Amino acid sequence: MSVFLYNLVICSYANYLNKKHTSNSIKEAKFSNLFDRHYNRLYNYAFKVLKESDPSKELTQETFIKLWENFEHINQSERSIESFLITTLKNKIIDAYRKKQTREKHTNVYALNTSIETEIDKQWELIERIEDIYTTLEQKTTDIFKLSRDKGLTYKEISQKKGISIKTVELHISKALAAFEKGLKDYL
């Protein structure tokens, strides 16, 4: 390659970089001007809708980031840029709202599942405790108590079925009730 051609390539590249730098400087100046003119109005709109400062700031910043990324593709008229900014911010607010709703829904489902699990665990623990109490009673007392509570038989019906006096039925029921009251005091 000749020296002349080499210098020509270098000069062309330098001009290209200079134009690119000038182009970026112009873009930065325009963007800075737009940011200064529109930021407060967009932030206030976001805050009015969201009623929270940090998310409003974040969405307004994201709106300007999107403007920067699409700056060359937007018609440079004031009306087009305003429309772009407002539409972008509205869409970001809608997306944020949807994400928040989804997050709350999942949080509520998790809380409900946890609550149900806790309730099931408590019920299971209670059932196990009742079974433990039954094992401490005499078999005859357990049978009489279950006839009374599970089958719904009266003391008279139990006494006839077991061939014992009503007073004996009352004694066995009293023993069982005392054992349950003592064993289930944490659940009452």
Image: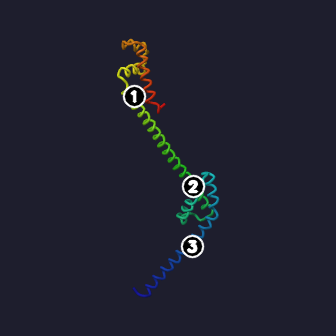
Amino acid marked by disc 3? Ser
Looking at the rendering, which quadrant does residue 178 occupy?
Answer: top left
The residue positioned 42% from the left and 23% from the top of the image is 176
Position above or below: 8 against 160: below
Q: Which residue is mark 3?
A: 25
How far across and down, in percent of the image, does residue 96 sit?
A: 54, 52
Alpha-carbon span between mark 2 and mark 1: 57 Å
Q: Which of the pair 29/20 is nearer the observer? A: 29
Q: Position of residue 177 (x, y in %)?
A: 44, 24
N-terminal-most mark, 2 or 3:
3
* SS assignment at label 3: helix
Residue 54 x/y as whole percent: 58, 56
Q: Amino acid at mark 2?
A: Pro
Q: Which residue bears the numbered disc 1?
A: 133
Helix, strand, or loop for circle 2? helix
Query: Could you tell which of marks 1 and 3 lies nearer the N-terminus?
Result: 3
Name the mark nearer the viewer: 2 or 3: 2
35 horizontally vs 176: left or right? right
Q: In the image, what residue type sits under mark 1? A: Ile
Instruction: Describe the element under mark 1 as helix, strand or loop.
Output: helix
Q: Position of residue 2 (x, y in %)?
A: 41, 87
Q: Give 175 or 31, whichever is nearer the viewer.
A: 175
Q: Residue at x 63, y 63 (%)?
A: 78
Tell me which numbered mark, 2 or 1, is placed earlier along the sequence.
2
- Nearest the viewer among 116 and 51 is 116
In which quadrant of the rendered image does the N terminus lie? Answer: bottom left
Q: So how many labels did they put on this image? A: 3
